[in-house]
């Protein structure tokens, strides 16, 4: 009976070992990995596979920050995250969305009046990008308008793609509705096309100035029109910039309009753009300020009328005794100084009013 039990127990242990080989194998792999990390020779020796571990393709992609599909919504990692960590997201400037939302609404009305057509302007997206990367991504042919923010003493860029250029030309020169704008590739833009686009840029800049007015008064002045991105360089290639992509639709015609503002251009109004809503005062309480200003008018202050002053030595002061006389050089026509604390406020003539001594103010002193 005992032999049968021993046999049964031995069989059970053997079955358990055979049924769970992964546990034993996992222990061996873990021991080998620790030996490789510790620099041990292991079973394979110093030149064995345990001494030098080669990364597989998934680990290399993870290190470099590459992912399949290139989905921008996924969080970046590895070297790509380190490189992009210096980029500033436009979401840190919440008021930009309010400004560009105003621009879209105003631009829709302005372009309708400009073209006498049904124009719809929509905001595609607002993104941050390096200036050099943006110039390399511009689809040619296109027109690039350089403008200057005079109060901020810096520049911005407006890019008009070829579809919008031909659509504007077609609309302004009386093209019939229902027919797509004719595009002729491989030729430079004519003077007429450039002049018509420049007029449209003037409309956009006027609305952009009006959109920024609630935050800061600024005048965007048209500087020049370029067709080569290299001649439209307004910042260093590595500098961060904000790109606003607008879609202009005129029934069956239209195109894209892109507005680029370097962060250096927005720096003078950065504090204003950090507001969460229009009119935020960053901790200032206007009600309390008004109350304090009102109460200041009812505050009592003590004024001193100084007839004259003189400087004496400490030795003379120590020799003073009862009956000593201090000579002052003030006369009845001398001006008396009125001061509050250490602040000199007025000068005037001393006189008498009723039973009280009075001072008539003759001169107000700048404080």
Image (cartoon, helix red, strand yellow):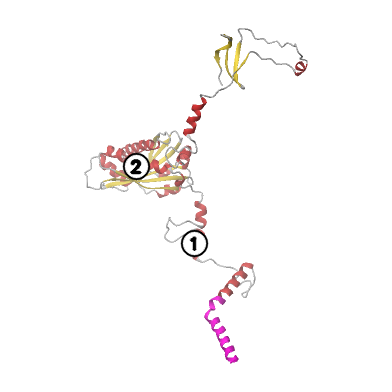
Q: Nearer the viewer, mark 1 or mark 2?
A: 2
The vertical placement of 67 against 324, above or below, is: below
Q: Position of residue 172 (x, y in %)?
A: 26, 39
Q: How many marks?
A: 2
Q: Which mark is residue 238?
A: none
* Disc 1 secondary structure class: helix
Please rate how many residues cluster around mark 2, counting C-alpha atoms within 10 Å: few if below 14, some from 14 to 19, many from 20: many
Tell me which corner region of the image, top left, top right, bottom left or bottom right, holds residue 43: bottom right
317 displayed left or right of 244? right
63 displayed left or right of 246? right
* Disc 2 secondary structure class: helix
Please rate how many residues cluster around mark 1, counting C-alpha atoms within 10 Å: few if below 14, some from 14 to 19, many from 20: some
Q: Report how far apart the C-alphas of labels 1 and 2 lie in the structure.
A: 41 Å
Residue at screen point 38% across, 36% down: 209
Q: Position of residue 35 (x, y in %)?
A: 62, 70
Q: Position of residue 262 (x, y in %)?
A: 45, 42
Tell me which corner region of the image, top left, top right, bottom left or bottom right, holds residue 212: top left
Residue 6 in magenta stretch: yes
The vertical placement of 55 against 130, above or below, is: below
Residue 117 in magenta stretch: no
Q: Which mark is residue 61?
A: 1
Q: Which mark is residue 104?
A: 2
363 displayed left or right of 73? right
Indicate the quadrant containing the N terminus: top left, top right, bottom left or bottom right. Answer: bottom right
Q: Nearer the viewer, residue 229 or 340?
A: 340
The vertical placement of 323 against 201, above or below, is: above
Which residue range is magenta in the image?
Answer: 1-24
Specify the principal SS of the magenta part. helix
Indicate the quadrant containing the C terminus: top left, top right, bottom left or bottom right. Answer: top right
Q: Nearer the viewer, residue 259 or 208?
A: 208
The vertical placement of 210 against 82, above or below, is: above
């Amino acid at each position: 009976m005992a032999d049968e039990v021993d046999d049964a127990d031995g069989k059970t242990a053997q079955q358990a070992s055979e049924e769970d080989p992964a546990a034993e194998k996992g222990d061996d792999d873990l021991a080998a990995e620790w030996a490789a990390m510790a620099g041990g020779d292991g079973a394979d020796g110093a030149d064995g596979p345990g001494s030098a571990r080669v990364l597989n393709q998934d680990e290399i992609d993870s290190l470099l920050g590459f992912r399949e599909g290139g989905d921008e919504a996924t969080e970046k990692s590895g070297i790509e995250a380190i490189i992009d960590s210096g980029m500033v997201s436009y979401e840190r400037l919440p008021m930009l969305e309010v400004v560009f939302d105003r621009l879209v609404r105003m631009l829709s009305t302005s372009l309708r009046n400009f073209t006498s057509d049904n124009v719809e302007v929509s905001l595609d997206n607002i993104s941050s990008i390096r200036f050099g990367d943006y110039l390399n991504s511009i689809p040619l042919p296109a027109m690039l308008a350089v403008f200057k923010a005079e109060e901020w003493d810096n520049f911005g860029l407006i890019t008009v793609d070829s579809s919008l250029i031909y659509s504007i030309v077609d609309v302004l020169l009386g093209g019939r509705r229902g027919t797509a704008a004719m595009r002729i590739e491989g030729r430079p833009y004519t003077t007429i096309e450039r002049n018509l686009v420049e007029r449209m840029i003037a409309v956009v800049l006027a609305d952009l100035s009006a959109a920024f007015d609630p935050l800061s008064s600024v005048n965007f002045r048209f500087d020049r029109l370029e067709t080569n991105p290299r001649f439209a360089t307004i910042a260093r290639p590595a500098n961060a910039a904000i790109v606003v992509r607008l879609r202009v639709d005129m029934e069956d015609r239209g195109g894209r309009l892109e507005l680029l503002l370097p962060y250096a251009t927005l720096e003078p109004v950065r504090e204003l753009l950090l507001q969460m809503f229009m009119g935020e005062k960053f901790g200032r309480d206007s009600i309390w300020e008004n109350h304090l200003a009102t109460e200041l008018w009812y505050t009592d202050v003590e004024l001193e009328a100084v007839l004259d002053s003189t400087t004496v030595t400490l030795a003379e002061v120590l020799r003073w005794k009862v009956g000593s006389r201090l000579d002052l050089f003030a006369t009845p026509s001398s001006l008396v100084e009125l001061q509050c604390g250490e602040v000199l406020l007025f000068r005037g003539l001393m006189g008498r009013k009723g039973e009280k001594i009075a001072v008539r103010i003759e001169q107000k002193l700048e404080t």
